[in-house]
Image (spheres, rainbow, N blue to C red):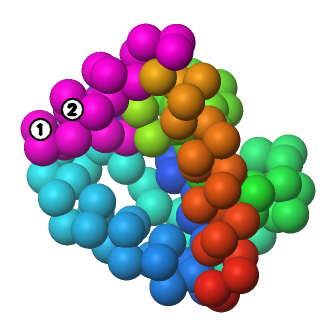
Amino acid sequence: MKEKKINVFFDGSCKVCSKEISFYDKHDKKKKFNWIDLNSEDLHLKRLGISKNELLKSLHIQLQDGRIIKGVNAFRIIWREYPFLKLISYILDFKIMRIIARPIYRALVKLKSLIV
């Protein structure tokens, strides 16, 4: 039986986002992820039950069991699959690090919206 992949929803119209996802995809040797551009996957988004506007506010992933994870916690899961990012994902397991990382992430998302 084919293993289900983690769905990663990203803004393909954002050059920064697309470059980052392209980097992850290039290094996704185990093909653990489906990279889903929010601008080209309307049917999948309807099944997800989350508006496109909400998905654009932060990175969202859908785990194999259907759970939705977003923001810093989504990056923790993605980064855990890459040997060169695994340490960062484990550092973010500490609650205090997530508390620090969340406002930084939100600021970066706002900055991204100004760039795009």
Can see residue 10?
A: yes
Q: Residue at x 65, y 41 (%)?
A: 103
CB under 8 Å between discs 1 and 2: yes
Reading the image, the residue beneath label 1 is 83
In magenta stretch: residue 95? yes
- Magenta residues span 77-96
Q: Nearer the viewer, residue 2 or 6?
A: 6
Residue 1 percent location from the top left of the image: 30, 30
In percent of the image, x 58 and y 81: which residue is there?
A: 14
Q: Amino acid at mark 1?
A: Pro
- Residue 100 location in percent, x, y? 55, 30
| Crowd rating for badge 1 (residues with CA inside 10 Å; few <14, some 14–19, many 20+) | few
Q: Residue at x 43, y 55 (%)?
A: 34
- In the picture, the disc for residue 86 is 2
Sort mark 2 into few (<14), some (14-19) or many (20+) by Cα contacts within 10 Å. some
Q: Nearer the viewer, residue 29 or 11?
A: 11
Using the numbered discs, state the Cα–Cα distance from disc 1 to disc 2 in whole angstroms: 5 Å
Q: Is residue 37 above or below residue 34?
A: below
Q: What secondary structure is marked by label 1?
A: loop
Which amino acid, by three-letter code, is at mark 2?
Answer: Lys
Q: Is residue 113 left or right of residue 46?
A: left
Q: Quadrant of the C terminus?
A: bottom right
Residue at disc 2, secondary structure: helix
- Please tell me whether residue 25 belongs to the stretch shown in magenta: no
